[in-house]
């Protein structure tokens, strides 16, 4: 008889495959990330979301109808994306176990944005090394929504660090959390839940705005993404606090500063990194010429520098490896203590 732990982490394919998928996907993301110009699952999600949204906004003006359409969009896109991920994985394993392992690993790697975040940060920081502020601003505009034209060197680096620390959760740690959770659920696997979360994140980034015309259409998408990200975000905060040995300070300052952020998650993520690095994030950002203040996070003990941005990315990598190592260790212990028949 299987022990409860081994039964919990068994899926339709062998447990060793589930762990192999996680390990291979993590390595693929670290090694190559998302090669520029290659097809990506998010592109397919974005195409569906965009066409549906434009159709709703064009044909319906009533706020209630838009809210109903937004609920259909959010629940339908998330559920169908998870089912598609499950179907692809199961179909691949049915054809051949190694084919299933390869396809599921590649698709799961596309859910992690660790390498993409590092590449984006380095793309913006490289011109700054040569005092080419104009090129750095142009590169930054590819990754953030704020107006880059009048940003100073320090403001460019703040924008990079805020992007790296905010997306550490929804782009890296939350997809890993749901991949691990899926691996622990019988007959699910790592890919479907990670795919479903990626759909929620994509929905939030495309329609989850408080401004028109997405106020009603994107309300449900934003709420679902907030809910799905809440626990992985707090778990990331705790993990980083333990790794840096300053969890009490992080929690205290997050309670003071991060709670002022309108997002229940991004403020906590950014504030955690700010405390560890001894920098201050937040302030006034301009979007299409309109100033939008964000709460100041932490006390500015140190300036934001490229080295501290790289340190933030290294912290994310260590957090990622910590969760992965704990998952593998739990499986290993379950094989050593399988339980009594």
Image: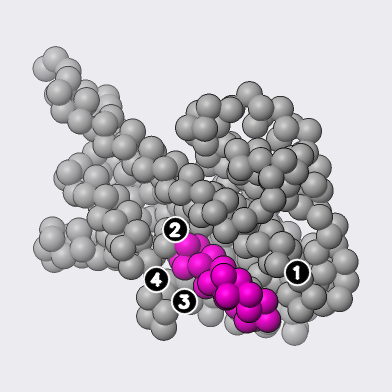
Label 4 sits on a secondary structure element that is loop
Residue 280 is left or right of residue 18, and the answer is right
- Classify mark 4: residues with Cα within 10 Å, few (<14), some (14-19) or many (20+): many
Q: Which residue has dot 1 on it?
A: 152
Where residue 260 appears, as percent x and y from the top left, is 81, 42
Q: CA distance from mark 2 to mark 4?
A: 10 Å
Mark 2, residues whose alpha carbon is within 10 Å: few (<14), some, or many (≥20)?
Answer: many
Q: Name the residue tied to disc 3.
A: 44
280 relative to 241, above or below: below
Q: Nearer the viewer, residue 252 or 137?
A: 137
> In the displayed structure, does residue 260 sit left or right of residue 242?
right
- Tell me which segment is drawn in magenta: 116-139
Q: Is residue 129 left or right of residue 114?
A: right
User: What is the spatial separation of the Cα atoms under label 2 and label 1, in whole angstroms?
Assistant: 26 Å
Tell me the CA gap for discs 2 and 3.
21 Å
* Lower sequence index among marks 2 and 3: 3
């Amino acid at each position: 008889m299987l022990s409860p732990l081994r039964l919990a982490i068994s899926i339709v394919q062998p447990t060793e495959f589930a762990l192999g998928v996680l390990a291979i996907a993590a390595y693929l993301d670290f090694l190559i990330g998302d090669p520029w110009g290659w097809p990506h699952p998010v592109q397919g999600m974005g195409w569906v979301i965009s066409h549906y949204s434009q159709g709703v906004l064009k044909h319906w003006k009533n706020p209630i109808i838009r809210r109903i359409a937004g609920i259909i969009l959010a629940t339908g896109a998330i559920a169908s994306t998870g089912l598609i991920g499950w179907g692809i994985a199961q179909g691949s394993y049915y054809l051949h176990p190694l084919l299933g392992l390869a396809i599921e690993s590649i698709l799961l790697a596309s859910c992690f944005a660790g390498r993409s975040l590092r590449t984006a940060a380095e793309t913006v920081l490289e011109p700054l090394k040569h005092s080419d502020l104009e090129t750095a601003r142009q590169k930054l505009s590819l990754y953030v929504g704020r107006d880059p034209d009048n940003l100073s060197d320090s403001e460019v680096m703040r924008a990079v660090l805020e992007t790296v620390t905010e997306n550490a959760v929804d782009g890296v740690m939350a997809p890993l959390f749901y991949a691990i959770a899926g691996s622990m659920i019988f007959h699910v696997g790592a890919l479907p839940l990670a795919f479903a979360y990626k759909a929620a994140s994509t929905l939030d980034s495309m329609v989850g705005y408080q401004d028109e015309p997405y106020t009603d259409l994107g309300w449900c998408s934003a709420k679902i993404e907030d809910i799905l990200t809440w626990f992985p975000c707090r778990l990331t905060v705790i993990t980083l606090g333990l790794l840096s040995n300053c969890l009490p300070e992080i929690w205290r300052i997050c309670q003071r500063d991060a709670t002022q952020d309108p997002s229940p998650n991004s403020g906590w993520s950014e504030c955690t990194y700010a405390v560890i690095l001894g920098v201050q994030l937040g302030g006034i950002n301009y979007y299409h010429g309109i100033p939008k203040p964000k709460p100041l996070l932490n006390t500015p003990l140190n300036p934001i520098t490229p080295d501290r941005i790289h340190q933030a990315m290294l912290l994310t990598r260590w957090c990622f490896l910590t969760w992965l190592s704990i998952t593998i260790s739990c499986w290993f212990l379950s094989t050593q203590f399988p339980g009594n028949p």
